[in-house]
Image (cartoon, helix red, strand yellow):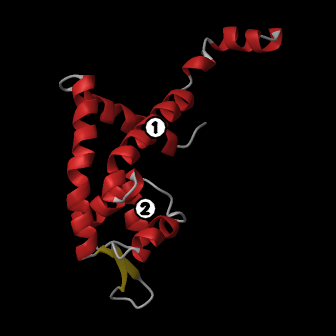
Amino acid sequence: MKPELEKLIKESRLDPTCCVLRQVTRTSRMIVAAFDAALGPAGVTAHQFTVLVALAHGGPLNVNSLATAVGMHSSTTPRMIAPLMRRGLVRIQLGADRRQRLIDITVKGNKTLLRAYPLWAQVQRGILQHLGPGAWPGMMQSLGAIRTSLTKPTR
């Protein structure tokens, strides 16, 4: 390691190999891959599954509300729902205001969600069992705290 970097690390007392981004990204990629593999037989990806769940639970939703519900940027929502629309799993309806578009799950989308749910549940249970009883709520709280810390202005 270069002396300049070594000095910075020593002064900051922060180990870059323990970087939050590094650890969360590595874990996130593995989680997505596990859920994608499990949900493949139902014909949806992990991200598509979360969209269908959000719509089944709270739909119909406008683009911003759906983006918030699944934790994505609203500019990526149309790309995420396009394949679901092509397959007839979601539809777009006009809202009360003709400029508003509402995304809703279709009957076919609900059937797909019902096929996918047990596949999702198997992976979810496996992860939760591996973590041990009661660990997940605390981890969700910690992840929420990280998100909150990133929405507050820094000084």
Residue 65 in the figure: left or right of residue 4 = left
The 10 Å Cα crowd at callout 1, few under 14, some 14 to 19, many 20 or more, is few
Residue type (three-letter) at the residue carrying disc 2: Ala
Residue 45 x %, y % = 40, 54
Q: Mark 2 and mark 1: span between their CA atoms?
A: 18 Å
Element at label 1: helix
Residue type (three-letter) at the residue carrying disc 1: Ser
Residue 107 in the figure: left or right of residue 20 = left
The residue located at (22%, 67%) in the rendering is 111
Q: Which residue is mark 1?
A: 28
Rendering quarter of residue 67:
bottom left
Residue 133 x %, y % = 18, 24
Q: In the current view of this chain or complex, which residue is farthest to the right?
A: 3
Quarter of the picture holding the C terminus: top right
Rendering quarter of residue 148:
top left
Q: Which residue is mark 2?
A: 67
The residue located at (74%, 10%) in the rendering is 6
86, 100: nearer the viewer: 86
Tally the numbered discs. 2
1, 30: nearer the viewer: 30
The residue located at (81%, 13%) in the rendering is 4
35, 55: nearer the viewer: 35
Q: Is residue 20 above or below residue 59?
A: above
Q: Is residue 58 above or below residue 60?
A: above
Residue 25 in the figure: left or right of residue 38 = right
